[in-house]
Image (spheres, rainbow, N blue to C red):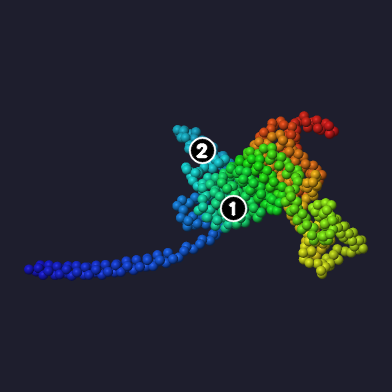
Amino acid sequence: MTDRPESRLSGKELFKSATKKVKMGKKLERVMKGDRSATSATSHDTSDVDGNKSPEPYSCTGDFEADYTELCNRAGLMEIPKVVPRPHRPGPPPPPDPKSATPMSQRESCKSARSTRMEKVEEPTSPVPSEQEEPPPTTYTTSDKFDYFKPKVQVELEKPEDKKSMTEVYIRGWKVDQKYIDIFKQCFPAADKLHTIDFWNVGLTDNTLAQFAAVASQCLNLRTVKLDGNPVPGEGFHQLIGEDSMIVSMSLRSCKITDKGAELIGKALSTAKTRNQSLCALNLNSNMITDAGACYIANGLRMNRTLLVLSIANNAIGDEAAKKFGEVLSRFALTHEEVVERRKVLSEKGAPDVRRSPISRRAESRDRPGSQSSRSQLDKSMAKSGRASSKAKKDKKEDDKKGKGKDDKWKKEPQRGASKETLGKASKGKGRQSGGKKGQGAGSITEAETPDILEIINPLLEEAERVDGELLIPGNRALINLNISRNRIGEAGLKSLLKGIQYQITLTTLGSRSGGTGLMRLSVQKNSFLPNHESYLKMQELMMTRDPLYKPPSKTPDEESTSQATGS
């Protein structure tokens, strides 16, 4: 009887708790529905806001690896080539330092060695093969399996701890398409110390090459560009060596350059009005250049006095191009366009010094060409300046004899009517005015303090000679290394090259070094002539003494004894 009400109460309590749970569940469902609707509304709002906003442009920091990775992620690239340091041959191991081991430590090591030997003798054990680790290689570096063939961007850092000190970039054997060019457009100009870019076999096109040339012009310290193994249909490599280019060395090996590309490169080197003044080395090995293209390049050397090293080896060059190179190296006749430009340059140079009436100019132009008359006027002005300098020297000597001390020179003031330009010219002149010598005021620059700056002389201003109605000027003597080996040059072309070398040597022996020293190395081996040809042997004999890397063969003891005997 007593158990029934307890069971009834427990049933009521259970019912009440169940109803409470149901009510709480409905409330929770309402709350959850409200939260979901609120979150969906907020998500729609944020999506609308994100859709209206454009992503902020990325500004490069100069850290190439960080900038490159961020721009690749923004471009949506799935596989990003890694940026790794360029591998180098491991250096030799350092020699053991004999001073590191003291005599006491040596004795202790000897004692320990003896004790171990005694222990080994007393307790013979079975020989156990000792597994010694192989030393690392000294001539190459190893990499993981298949890692060598993965696309990478190899970089060279000036300081390994400084990520912003990248100086060189190397890409080998993977296609650099438009996406990567767009990335490099932002990365390369931000690298202040970048001076070398080497893209080997990266599949450049006409469009990507033009954009790469534009990027190269924005890199202020870029000096070396190598694009070997990149045949481009339009052959627009001349865009890299324009008149305002700062590239010093360029390599275009195995780019399938034909006469079309050689013509563009030759015109980029120089014309009658424009010339490249920065490129010093050009490598065109293993291309498809024939006589016509090589003649265009030779014409580019007529007014160019900056290029020092030229290589056109392993092409299809014959005697016609060799004759053209021999002519450019010795002396050549000016074309009509070059004669007109020469007269303009001479008139501009001689205008401030010489003022003549138009009647006298017309009268003199009837007798001889304007180029020679303007040249004579330049010679007269130079003679006048020489007389003025000699007169100034005589006045100085007289002042020294009269007893004027050095202290009086410091008290001299410049003339009131003298402008800043005339004072600057006077300080730069060498011996033409007394202001170029020591003892002037603090504002003047002495001759010893001014550095010797190599001034590139316009070839049109060199002395000309009229022969058979043509105006001849000395050829290119700035080029010091020419490689035309492995071509099709025969006996006629070889003789023309020999004449050009002989002419340069003659000018050098006469003391004419205004235009340069001339060729110092000439490679013509493996052409269409025999190695024992007379002209070739004579050329080798002449160039042997001019080669700066030539070492005469060492004398035998018998030759030394005979030379000493003749000397005594």
The one nearer the camera, 162 or 108, is: 162
* 395 horizontally vs 244: left or right: right
Q: Is residue 93 visible?
A: no
Residue 292, numbered label: none
Location of residue 448 (image quadrant): bottom right
x and y, in percent, of residue 420 in the image: 77, 66
Q: Quadrant of the N terminus?
A: bottom left
Q: Which residue is mark 2?
A: 116
Q: Earlier in the sequence, mark 1 or mark 2?
A: 2
The one nearer the camera, 10 or 117, is: 10
What amino acid is labelled 2 in the image? Thr
Location of residue 24 (image quadrant): bottom left
Q: Who's the residue at 37% across and 66% down the image?
A: 44
x and y, in percent, of residue 116 in the image: 51, 38
Q: Who's the residue at 54% across and 57% down the image?
A: 186
The one nearer the camera, 13 or 441, is: 441
Packing grade of label 2 (10 A; few <14, some 14-19, many >=20) is: few
Q: Quadrant of the C terminus?
A: top right
* 268 horizontally vs 156: left or right: right
What amino acid is labelled 1 in the image? Ala
Q: Is residue 508 visible?
A: yes
Q: Farthest residue toward the left? A: 1
The one nearer the camera, 499 or 456, is: 499
Measure the alpha-carbon separation of dots 1 and 2: 70 Å
Q: Farthest residue toward the top? A: 558
Q: Which residue is mark 1?
A: 213
Q: Who's the residue at 64% across and 46% down the image?
A: 263
x and y, in percent, of residue 275 in the image: 69, 52
Say what secondary structure mark 1 lies in.
Answer: helix
Q: Nearer the viewer, mark 1 or mark 2?
A: 1
- For the residues bearing labels 1 and 2, Cβ distance under 8 angstroms: no
Packing grade of label 1 (10 A; few <14, some 14-19, many >=20) is: some
